[in-house]
Structure formats: structure tokens, C-alpha cells
Image: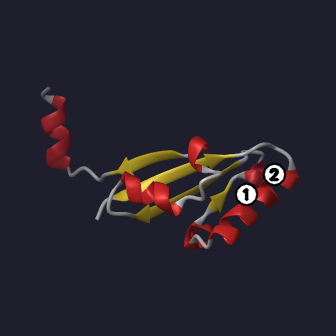
Amino acid sequence: MPTYLVEIPHSEKVSECKKVITVFLNSGSHLISHAHWGCKDGVHKLWFIYDFENKESVLRAIPPLMRPDAQIIELVKFRVEDVHLYAEE
């Protein structure tokens, strides 16, 4: 199953940080328990890395209010042999 990195930004207001948490909790999404937050260091984004079947299933797991700003990135690991193949292109 593919692994995805999801990034969701929000404003610098403390109330906005709390709002994001509340939206996730109220949506019933379990992803909030996997979230990493940058707020303490002044980077007002949350990230989580999780396995999903596809990008559509990632979107369904994100509360609708957060979907427009979400960035979804499929993560892959390359073997040394793979890197050599790309270097030849």
C-alpha cells in the first residue's frame, strides 16, 4: 500500500491551531493521532505520514474544510539500483 505525506497549513493564530484540531476531532478522523505539528517552532502546519490505497482515500480521510489547502505527496523509497537507472536518463 502506498505511503503518503500530507501537509495542511493554517494561520499563525493560536485559535486557528485549536480550530484545526477541533475540526479533525469532530470529523471522526483518526489521523489527528498521527499528526506532527510545527506550531511550537513557528511553522503553522501539520503533517502526517500514513498508508492509503490511493490519493482519493487520503482526501476522504481529511475533513472537508481542510481539503482545499492539503498537499498530498506519495512517498517512495529508491534502492541504490533505482538511483543508477535514473542517473542514466
Q: Residue at position x 70%, y 70% from top?
A: 26
Quarter of the image for the C terminus: give it. top left
Residue position marked by numbered label 2 in the rendering: 16
The percent position of residue 7, horizontal first and vertical second, equals 56, 49
From the viewer's perspective, tell me whether residue 85 is left or right of residue 45. left
- Residue at the far top: name it: 89
Asked if the residue under mark 2 is in contact with the one under mark 1, i.e. CB atoms within 8 Å, the reply is yes
- In which image quadrant can residue 88 be found? top left
Identify the coloring: secondary structure
Q: Amino acid at mark 2?
A: Glu
Q: Residue at position x 86%, y 53% from top?
A: 14
The percent position of residue 43, horizontal first and vertical second, equals 72, 45
From the viewer's perspective, tell me whether residue 22 is left or right of residue 72. right
From the viewer's perspective, tell me whether residue 68 is left or right of residue 2. right
Which of the pair 69/42 is nearer the observer? 69
Residue position marked by numbered label 1 in the rendering: 20
Which of the pair 10/44 is nearer the observer? 10
Q: Secondary structure at mark 2?
A: helix
Quarter of the image for the N terminus: give it. bottom left
Q: Residue at position x 13%, y 37% from top?
A: 85
How dense is the environment of label 2, judged by Cα within 10 Å: few (below 14), some, or many (20 and up)? few
The percent position of residue 49, horizontal first and vertical second, equals 48, 60
Where 83 falls versus 31 (above or below)?
above
